[in-house]
Amino acid sequence: MSPLRIGYLLLAVWGAVHPMMYYFQWARDNGSSLAGLSDAWQANAATSGLAWGLTIASIALTLWTVAETRVRRNWSALLAIPATFLIGVSCGLPLYLFLRTRPVT
């Protein structure tokens, strides 16, 4: 495996684990309700802007993943879509790049 692919994989793991540490801390302190989480995302202008920025980036990554997958027929790259929406762009993007840069056979 190339150093670039290893870097993408490490970023995908870090992008999954590190943000979840903050989420689990928040859930421990506030409960794990989706309504409470949504309220936290709208707590102030900074968090609202961040939430919208990540939402737009997630949609763009999804469109790119679908378009590239149709052309390249690299169906495993579709795993980046649930990773993006269930974990976050910090995991989904490096995971997609890791899956996209695999050697073509």
Image (cartoon, rainbow, N blue to C red):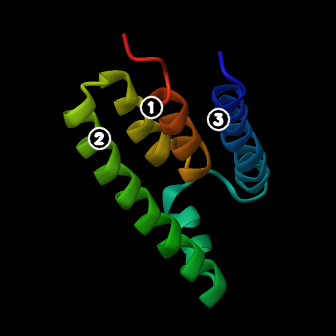
Residue 99, position as x, y percentages in the image = 48, 27
Amino acid type, mark 1: Arg
Nearest the camera: 56 or 8?
8
Residue 42 seen from this side: yes
Residue 44 seen from this side: no
**If you read the primary sequence from the N terminus, does the residue marked by circle 2 or circle 3 appear first?**
3
**If you read the primary sequence from the N terminus, does the residue marked by circle 1 or circle 3 appear first?**
3
- Residue at coordinates 76% horizontally, 49% vertically from top-left? 28
Residue 46, position as x, y percentages in the image = 65, 85
Residue 17, position as x, y percentages in the image = 73, 38
Task: Say if mark 2 contacts mark 1, CB within 8 Å.
Answer: yes
Q: Of all residues shown, which one is farthest toward the top? A: 105
Q: Image quarter for residue 15?
A: top right
Amino acid type, mark 2: Glu
Nearest the camera: 104 or 78?
104
- The numbered mark at residue 8 is 3
- On the image, numbered disc 1 is attached to which residue? 100
> On the rendered structure, is 37 left or right of 14?
left
Amino acid type, mark 3: Tyr
Tell me the distance, in whole angstroms, between the alpha carbons under discs 1 and 3.
10 Å
- The numbered mark at residue 14 is none
Of the 4 image quadrants, the one containing the C terminus is: top left
Task: Say if mark 1 contacts mark 3, CB within 8 Å.
Answer: no
- On the image, numbered disc 2 is attached to which residue? 68
Of helix, strand and loop, which one carries label 2? helix
